[in-house]
Image: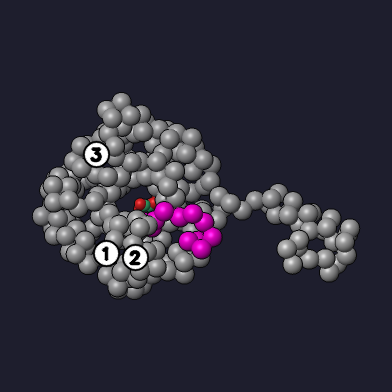
Amino acid sequence: MEILIDSANIKEIIRLIDLYPIDGVTTNPTIIAKEKETFLPLVQEIKRHIGYEKTLHVQTLSTEANDIVNEALHLTDQLDGNVYVKIPVIPEGIKAMKTLHQDGVKLTATAVITPLQALMAAKAGADYVAPYVNRVSNLSVDGTKVVGEIVNLFNIYQISTKVLGASFKNVDQIKQVALNGSHAITASPDMIDAIQEHLLTEWSVNQFSSDWKKAFGEDAVPFFK
Ligand code: E4P
């Protein structure tokens, strides 16, 4: 499963890429707005930091198909490497995806709430679809199951579009979508840290260190030193 960072914060992106096997970065207008920096230079800087291969998913803001297409073409012109244009699955977004797919632009369909929206986006040429797990769960429908249903639909129809689970508010949601076969997830820096950090793990590591010191003295050093 691919793991992406849902953030436009350069410091956090650098920190997480240093620690974890990260596959890319996703942004949306809300995430960009939080950084209070000029849009294009910021996404260009993110791309420089993550390198050519890791995927960068950048969202359009327009709501008319022609404008979405123009925005997407401008973005792909200004960004090098493995770039996906994120487009919400509104009807005009689907129309834009059909055109952009024919032009060879790589696409991530976003703001997906239902499995059929995902199916439509995949048919229109989306390479990834991003179901909003927590936003769905807030409607009293299990968002993690929606991810599983989309994965099933893509398997039934042998569709190669990947499911990119998004909008997580706890680690259990990430675990559930992983079990449901999501090809990728994108999560905030806090969520990614929360995947790995565990009090019992930390406690165990402290225990190892204290047992070692008890046996070999306070100044005992690791084996390789
Ligand atoms: C990512 O592609 C989405 O824009 C993002 O995960 C939405 O998350 P939120 O529901 O936490 O805003």
Q: Do the residues labelled 3 and 1 touch (CB within 8 Å)?
A: no
The one of 154 and 48 positioned closer to us in this rendering: 48
Tag 2 residue? 47
Coloration mode: one colour
Element class at badge 1: loop
Quarter where residue 95 is shown: top left
In the rendered structure, which segment of residues is drawn in magenta? 16-26
Say which residue label 3 marks.
Answer: 122
Mark number displayed over residue 194: none
Residue type of the residue flagged with mark 3: Ala
Q: In this rendering, would 84 be left or right of 67? A: right
Give the residue type that dot 2 points to.
Lys
Mark 3 / mark 2, whichever is N-terminal: 2
Report the Cα–Cα distance between label 3 and label 2. 25 Å
Which quadrant holds the C terminus?
bottom right
Residue pictured at 41% horizontal, 53% vertical: 23
Residue at x 16%, y 60% (from the top left corner): 73
Q: Could you give the CA–CA distance between mark 3 and mark 1, rounded to whole angstroms?
A: 24 Å
Q: Position of residue 153 (x, y in %)?
A: 31, 29
| Rendered residue at 29%/73% (across/down) | 41
